[in-house]
Image (cartoon, helix red, strand yellow):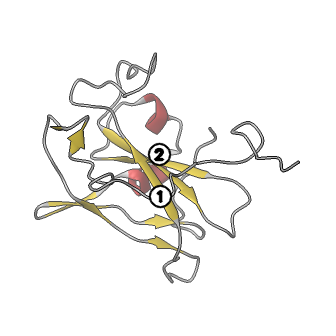
Amino acid sequence: MKLIPTGEMTLGPFFPREFAQGANDLTVLEGHKARGELIEVSGRITQLDGRPLDNVVVEIWQADSRGRYDAPDLAAVEGRLPHINFLLLYSGLMRQLQTVMFFELGADPVLDAVPVARRELLVAKRLTGGYRFDIRLRGETETPFFDD
């Protein structure tokens, strides 16, 4: 008998065999254009020596234009700054890495948990037409990561 791992037995995320056309289009939600300001975020995930990592799975999620997540009972916490969450999976990592990109510094319970000297590492750089957010896995400018 062949046993198939279930969600409780193995580390996700779980992907379909193939994605539907447009499945990675984050500007569309349930067949409709997302509300709010559409932005472009670019960046690299780098090692200690600055070399970019390849074959990294990056999961991105953020609250909608009303500050709510598309999941039951996961309403945005009052007092949160606008932000985007990133979850990284890579074959050389023993666990998932989770971080948050903010658009500006300010009062936020997650940002407040980071030492003041390191908070700027979680703020995206404004570019013409979008933002840049580099994620560094090690070193003095390592991106702060959070437990689940």
Give the label, 1 or 2, closer to the camera: 1
Nearest to N terminus: mark 1 or mark 2: 1
* Label of residue 58 in the image: 1
Q: Out of 72 and 120, give the one closest to the viewer.
A: 72
Q: Quadrant of residue 37?
A: top left
> Is 51 situated above or below 23?
below
What amino acid is at disc 1?
Val
Residue 96 on image: x %, y %: 63, 52
Q: Is residue 102 left or right of residue 2?
A: left
What amino acid is at disc 2?
Val
> Is 135 situated above or below 50?
above
> Is 11 situated above or below 8?
below
Q: CA distance from mark 1 to mark 2?
A: 26 Å
Residue at 48% x, 53% y is 118
SS of the residue under disc 1: strand
Q: Out of 31 and 3, give the one closest to the viewer.
A: 3
Residue 7 on image: x %, y %: 69, 39
Residue 6 on image: x %, y %: 72, 40
Residue behind mark 2? 116
Residue at 58% x, 48% y is 13
Residue at 60% x, 68% y is 138
State which quarter of the image contains the C terminus: top right
